[in-house]
Image: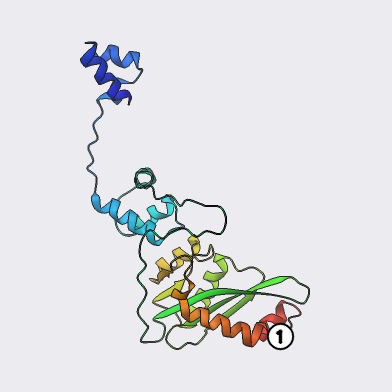
């Protein structure tokens, strides 16, 4: 805007560049600056694609994903494109769901063990009323649950610890289907998946049927275990689960 004002003053008021820059005010070097770097259309397009699939990621975490793919960018450039494309997640009040900005392509049915795993949480309470959670993992091909982790708190770091323990035992999936919960969208989970070449497939927000394997498992787990037992404490819950 200031550079445009300088141009108008020079053309209509017939004043020098020095005089116009002094009246605005703006530095003459700033007024003369011309951007030399050409815009890469692939960067803008890829940023839109990543923001559509990683809806909870801000521009800083999207920058990490871009750099992993070989784009030479810094946070300032990504932020500028992020704002220009209006990729910020708008938070609405109430329970209304945000519309998806891109269609999600469902994964194909797995044809071998450890090709696709699914993960999700369930919740229950001890006899005292204190709540606890379970992290349920299931192999999409064998329908076998390699791990059910039970604790009062299961953040992203704990999810990574469970995955690491299974990897040391020789179990590591090629892809994991998960929802958009904060534990799964955390940086630690994303970093672990990148370092271990595991693809994270996020389902569409508000459509749990896209992760039908684990939803079916959770229902049976609740009917056959959680609803049938009275849990005294954490040790009791771990033993019965």
In this rendered view, identify the residue nearer to me: 77 or 204.
204
Residue 147 appears in the rendering:
no
> What residue is at 42 percent from the left and 69 percent from the top?
200
Residue 12, placed above or below residue 219 = above
Q: Is residue 228 left or right of residue 49?
A: right
Tell me the SS state at disc 1: loop
The percent coordinates of residue 187 (x first, y second) are: 48, 60
Judged left or right of residue 88, residue 36 is: left
Q: What is the quadrant of the N terminus in the image? A: top left
**Is residue 220 visible in the rendered structure shown here?**
yes
Classify mark 1: residues with Cα within 10 Å, few (<14), some (14-19) or many (20+). some
Q: Residue furthest right?
A: 128
Figure check: 157 above or below 90: below
Q: What residue does disc 1 label?
A: 229
Residue at screen point 29% across, 14% down: 20
Q: Residue at x 24, y 50 (%)?
A: 41
Q: Position of residue 21 (x, y in %)?
A: 31, 16
Rendered image quadrant of residue 17: top left
* Quarter where residue 54 is shown: bottom left
Q: Position of residue 167 (x, y in %)?
A: 47, 78
Question: Closest to the observer: 132 or 36?
Answer: 132
Image quarter where the C terminus lies is bottom right
């Amino acid at each position: 805007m200031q550079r445009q004002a300088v141009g108008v003053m020079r053309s209509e008021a017939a004043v020098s560049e020095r005089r116009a820059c002094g009246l605005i005010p703006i530095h003459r070097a700033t007024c003369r600056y011309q951007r030399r770097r050409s815009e890469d259309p692939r960067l803008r397009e890829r940023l839109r694609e990543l923001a559509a699939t990683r809806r909870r990621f801000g521009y800083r975490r999207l920058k990490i994903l871009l750099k992993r793919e070989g784009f030479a960018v810094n946070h300032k450039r990504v932020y500028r494109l992020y704002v220009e494309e209006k990729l910020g997640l708008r938070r609405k009040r109430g329970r209304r769901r945000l519309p998806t900005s891109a269609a999600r392509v469902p994964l194909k049915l797995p044809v071998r063990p450890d090709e696709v795993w699914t993960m999700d949480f369930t919740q229950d309470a001890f006899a005292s009323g204190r709540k606890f959670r379970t992290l349920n993992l299931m192999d999409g091909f064998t329908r076998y649950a390699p791990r059910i982790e039970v604790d009062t708190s299961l953040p992203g770091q704990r999810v990574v610890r469970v995955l690491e323990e299974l990897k040391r035992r020789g179990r590591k999936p090629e892809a994991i289907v998960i929802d958009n919960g904060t534990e799964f969208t955390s940086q630690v989970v994303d970093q672990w998946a990148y370092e271990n070449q595991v693809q994270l497939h996020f389902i569409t927000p508000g459509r749990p049927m896209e992760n039908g394997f684990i939803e079916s498992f959770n229902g049976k787990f609740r009917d056959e275990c959680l609803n049938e037992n009275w849990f005294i404490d954490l040790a009791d819950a771990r033993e019965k689960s």
